[in-house]
């Protein structure tokens, strides 16, 4: 079975993606009354490369996607913060319905209504609702909900994040670290890589995995820049005492406390990720359809059709490929499919 652990939904028209013109002054707009057909229609109509999301899954042999809000539309910077809650909560509700209507294809991963002007505890009721009531299996976490409009919170190793980590451990669900949009000097896709890199180092410099040893954190887009500069970080942390974890292990062991998706669009990058991190800590993920759905002129396939690359790695055993394609996702997300 091929499980894509990094995928984003498409909302029906009128759900998510913008703030009401009155900025919520007249109360929360009602979620549109949508038929089952209207809820799943966005997944079955042409999008991106003129093929539907479902058709693109079938085209590359994906059996199931873990469906989350499209981060670029979560608008964590909106003011007042209640607009973020309404937008993210409505999208989560739609994702839950899409998963219920197409249970053979999707499982839900919720967004969190994070805002730079609120403590992380403000997100926890929605996390509980999504896991306990909507049947979702994990969540997205944005390490920079300020999105360039407001200063970011402390790094993910800071105790600011501890209430979220405690709740994730209590619910026994993983968090996929995935930034959202950014209004600043770098484009959003570079912002993703920068924030994911900062998140890894902040976590591994801290006490987080000492205080929460069963915490399950997955880093999007192949781990930002960290797996590709391991020598630099091993060299930087070669003197004991720089990190709380130094008393237990070296940096190259600590890196395996976090997990990485394979949302990379070149064979060489995929090979380096898997060789560096190991197949036990890599989850197949493509974000298909998305940024990588452009056609590779050299192969004629979409850049995010990455399964042929992994299949071609003769140095991976069949069992190791199975871990990447499904076993690791089943284990972390407790999937019964």
Image (cartoon, helix red, strand yellow):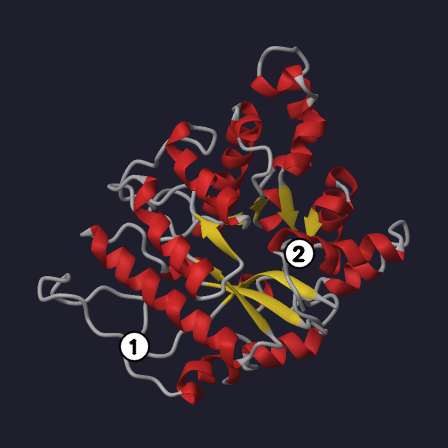
Q: In this rendering, is residue 265 above or below 232?
A: below
Whether residue 196 is visible to the viewer of this picture, yes or no, is yes
| Image vertical order of residue 297 relative to residue 152, above or below | below
Q: On the picture, is 14 further left or further right than 161?
A: left
User: Which quarter of the rendering shows the N terminus?
Assistant: bottom right
Percent position of residue 161, x then y: 41, 35
Residue position for label 2: 329
Q: Are marks 1 and 2 in contact (CB under 8 Å)?
A: no
Query: Who is closer to the viewer here, 1 or 230?
Result: 1
What's the mark number on residue 14? 1
Q: Is residue 47 visible?
A: no
Identify which residue, 104 or 186, lies in the foreground: 104
Tell me the SS state at disc 1: loop
* Residue 41, image x, y percentages: 45, 85
* Residue at position x 57%, y 30% in the image: 209
Indicate which disc residue 86 carries. Answer: none
Foreground residue among 292 and 242: 242
Q: Secondary structure at mark 2?
A: helix
How many other residues sit within 10 Å of disc 2, few (<14), some (14-19) or many (≥20)?
Answer: many
Q: Quadrant of residue 151?
A: top left
Label 1, label 2: how far apart the Cα atoms are? 32 Å
How many marks can you see?
A: 2
Left/right of residue 164 with respect to residue 82 in the rendered view? right
Q: Is residue 161 left or right of residue 334?
A: left
């Amino acid at each position: 079975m091929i499980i894509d652990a990094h995928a984003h939904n498409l909302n029906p028209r009128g759900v998510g993606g913008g703030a009401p013109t009155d900025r919520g002054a007249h109360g929360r707009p009602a979620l549109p009354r949508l038929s089952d057909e209207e809820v799943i229609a966005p997944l079955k109509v042409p999008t991106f490369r003129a093929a539907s999301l479902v058709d693109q899954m079938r085209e590359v042999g994906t059996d199931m996607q873990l469906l989350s809000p499209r981060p670029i539309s979560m608008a964590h910077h909106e003011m007042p913060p209640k607009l973020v809650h309404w937008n993210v909560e409505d999208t989560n509700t739609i994702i839950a319905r899409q998963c219920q209507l197409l249970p053979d294809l999707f499982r839900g991963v919720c967004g969190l209504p994070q805002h730079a002007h609120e403590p992380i505890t403000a997100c926890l009721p929605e996390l509980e609702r999504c896991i306990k009531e909507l049947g979702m299996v994990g969540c997205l976490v944005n390490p920079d909900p300020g999105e360039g409009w407001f200063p970011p919170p402390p790094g993910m190793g800071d105790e600011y994040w501890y209430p979220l980590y405690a709740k994730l451990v209590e619910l026994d669900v993983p968090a996929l670290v995935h930034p959202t949009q950014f209004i600043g000097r770098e484009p959003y896709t570079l912002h993703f890589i920068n924030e994911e890199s900062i998140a890894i180092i902040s976590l591994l410099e801290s006490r987080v995995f000492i205080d929460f040893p069963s915490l399950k954190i997955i880093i999007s887009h192949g781990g930002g820049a960290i797996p590709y500069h391991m020598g630099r970080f091993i060299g930087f942390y070669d003197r004991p005492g720089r990190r709380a974890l130094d008393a237990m292990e070296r940096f190259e062991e600590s890196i395996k406390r976090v997990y990485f998706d394979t949302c990379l669009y070149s064979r060489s990058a995929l090979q380096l990720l898997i060789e560096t991190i190991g197949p036990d800590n890599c989850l197949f993920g493509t974000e298909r359809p998305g940024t990588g759905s452009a056609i590779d002129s050299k192969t004629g396939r979409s850049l995010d059709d990455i399964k042929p690359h992994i299949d071609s790695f003769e140095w991976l055993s069949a069992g190791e490929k199975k871990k990447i394609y499904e076993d690791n996702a089943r284990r972390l997300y407790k999937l019964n499919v």
